[in-house]
């Protein structure tokens, strides 16, 4: 599975409905796109935009064909590039990485953390970070489905390198159980903490979440 996710911030005072209509139209291409969501973000995101726009393609070639040759790809570029309507877009294209699941959800809270590894000591260190981040889904009970992916191409505030996606049954599972779990703050946070020797993540992050219906994290990644 290949994915495109964009965090879209609408310009203050602009008509968000026009942005929604344009992105829905761009995602209507069922020749290349197998799944799409467009949802407003929930309160308390950080650099998370007003909307999460998420598209899934069966493979990278389908994404390239949609982006470069289809009417949908051109509509998306025009909508996201309209500076009268859109203030900021952080966009990531990526092959679905290692995926984990405890049980399917037909609705809940979809969360993604978009980050940039900007000072890694080595590829070995990045691989260790990848492994430990994935294992959050094993240790934190409220994470029901999860996937960590490396970004192929990106645009926005940083050169984004990773997308960490999770599905929760409810918001409490994210904002309390996940955020306050000791594996999170006592172990994983050292990669983000400038005072720790393992620090290698840019401190500018996109933490965004929304409600969803139907599965978002497709089971097309590697196990």
Image (cartoon, grey):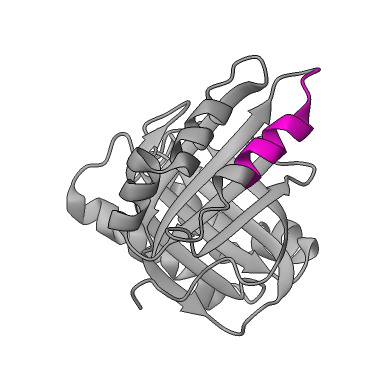
Residue in the foreground of this view, choosing between 202 and 73: 73
In the rendered view, does 190 fall on the left or right side of 185?
Answer: left
Q: Nearer the viewer, residue 19 or 42?
A: 19
Q: Main secondary structure of the magenta part?
A: helix
> Where on the picture, by quarter, is residue 182?
bottom right
Q: Residue furthest bottom?
A: 103
| Whole-percent x, y for residue 176 in the image | 75, 60
- Residue 154 found in image quarter: top left
**Picture coordinates of residue 212, whole percent (x, y):** 71, 62
Q: Quadrant of the C terminus?
A: bottom left
Residue drawn 51% across the image and 54% down it: 29
Magenta stretch holds residue 60: no
Residue 74, above or below 143: above
Expressed as whole percent of the image width and height from the top left, the position of residue 187 reads: 48, 59
- Residue, x 19% and y 55% (percent of image)? 124
- Which stretch did the figure color magenta? 13-24
Visible residue check, residue 199: no
Residue 179: x and y, percent? Answer: 66, 57
**Please, is residue 170 above or below residue 25 in the view?**
below
Which residue does the image show at 46% across and 65% down from the upper left? 147
């Amino acid at each position: 599975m290949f994915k495109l996710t964009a965090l879209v911030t609408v310009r203050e005072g602009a008509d968000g409905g026009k942005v929604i209509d344009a992105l829905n139209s761009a995602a209507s291409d069922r020749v290349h796109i197998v799944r799409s969501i467009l949802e407003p973000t929930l309160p308390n995101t950080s650099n998370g935009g007003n909307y999460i726009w998420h598209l899934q393609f069966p493979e990278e070639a389908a994404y390239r064909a949609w982006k470069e040759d289809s009417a949908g790809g051109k509509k998306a570029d025009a909508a996201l590039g309209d500076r009268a309507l859109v203030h900021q877009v952080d966009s990531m294209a990526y092959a679905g990485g290692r995926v984990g699941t405890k049980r399917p959800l037909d609705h809940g809270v979809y969360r993604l953390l978009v980050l940039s590894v900007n000072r890694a000591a080595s590829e070995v260190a990045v691989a260790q970070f990848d492994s430990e981040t994935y294992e959050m889904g094993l240790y934190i009970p409220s994470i029901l489905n999860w996937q960590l992916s490396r970004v192929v191409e990106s645009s926005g505030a940083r050169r984004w390198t990773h997308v960490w996606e999770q599905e929760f049954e409810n918001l409490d599972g994210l904002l309390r159980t996940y955020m306050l779990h000791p594996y999170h703050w006592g172990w994983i946070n050292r990669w983000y903490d400038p005072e720790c020797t393992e620090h290698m993540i840019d401190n500018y992050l996109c933490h965004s979440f929304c409600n969803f219906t139907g599965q978002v994290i497709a089971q097309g990644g590697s196990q």
